[in-house]
Image (tube, rainbow, N blue to C red):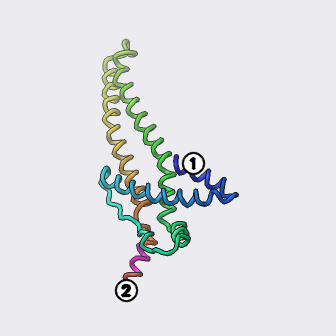
């Protein structure tokens, strides 16, 4: 939500130049959020995500630092991660809640609505409901894996950064 608000405010106000500092602040905030999300993915999901190269190590004037911030792939990937989090959270919540509610409904249905149904049908619906409730745990685990893989792809070191780092090490040796 912060990123969507910051982008819309920064882009709309950039016509009168007030939006430019807002956009640079948003990029810096996205990198900070990315650092927190890397730690969370490591601690909660067990994924190892190596941080991208630091921009502070480059130094230079404030203008140079802002240009480096805007040019860094990791900044844009962190912004993408922040933008992707909201729809991904909505889908995760909706699917998980849907599977769980379906399972609970199926568990309760044989004893409420199907009074005149054969016993085998009531038992089958009850077993299916129990299976759906148990399946909810696997759905949550799968969504956690998806979140972790996306975090690795968007918040870790990009392939282009890996190549540049390997080239720099090769030239130094």
Give coordinates of residue 17: x percent, y percent: 66, 60
Q: Which residues are magenta?
A: 162-167
Residue 147 part of the magenta segment: no
Q: Nearer the viewer, residue 147 or 43?
A: 43
Which secondary structure lies at badge 2? helix
Q: Nearer the viewer, residue 81 or 116?
A: 81
**Which label number is shown at residue 15?**
none
Q: Are there few (<14), some (14-19), or many (20+) residues within 10 Å of tag 2? A: few
Q: Where 108 falls versus 40 (above or below)? A: above
Q: Which residue does the image show at 51% across and 57% down from the upper left?
A: 79
Give coordinates of residue 139: x percent, y percent: 36, 42
Residue lying furthest right: 15
Residue lying furthest top: 116
Q: Which residue does the image show at 37% across and 86% down from the upper left?
A: 172
Q: Between tags 1 and 2, which lies in front?
A: 1
Residue where numbered disc 1 is placed:
5
Q: Nearer the viewer, residue 95 or 155?
A: 155
Label 1 close to label 2 by CB (< 8 Å): no
Q: Which residue does the image show at 51% across and 67% down from the upper left?
A: 69
Give coordinates of residue 50: x percent, y percent: 35, 64
Labels 1 and 2: the sequence-earlier one: 1
Quadrant in which the C terminus appears: bottom left
Which secondary structure lies at badge 1? helix
Q: Where 171 falls versus 67 (above or below)? A: below
Residue 59 lies left or right of residue 122; in this view the side is right
Give coordinates of residue 52: x percent, y percent: 41, 66
Q: Are there few (<14), some (14-19), or many (20+) residues within 10 Å of tag 1? A: few
Residue where numbered disc 2 is placed:
172
Magenta segment main secondary structure:
helix
Measure the C-alpha gap from mark 1 to mark 2. 44 Å
Write down the quadrant of residue 51 in the picture: bottom left
Write down the quadrant of residue 119 in the picture: top left
């Amino acid at each position: 939500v912060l990123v969507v608000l910051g982008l819309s405010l920064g882009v709309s106000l950039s016509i009168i130049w007030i939006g430019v500092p807002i956009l640079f602040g948003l990029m810096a905030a996205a990198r900070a959020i990315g650092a927190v999300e890397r730690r969370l993915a490591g601690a909660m999901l067990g994924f190892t995500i190596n941080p991208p190269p630091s921009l502070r190590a480059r130094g230079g004037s404030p203008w140079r630092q802002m240009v480096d911030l805007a040019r860094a792939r990791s900044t844009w990937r962190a912004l993408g991660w922040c933008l992707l989090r909201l729809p991904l959270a909505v889908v995760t919540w909706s699917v998980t809640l849907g599977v769980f509610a379906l399972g609970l409904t199926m568990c309760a249905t044989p004893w409420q609505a199907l009074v005149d149904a054969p016993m085998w049908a009531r038992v089958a619906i009850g077993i299916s409901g129990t299976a759906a409730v148990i399946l909810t745990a696997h759905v949550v685990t799968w969504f956690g894996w998806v979140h972790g893989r996306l975090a690795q792809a968007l918040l870790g070191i990009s392939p282009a950064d890996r190549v540049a780092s390997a080239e720099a090490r090769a030239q130094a040796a």
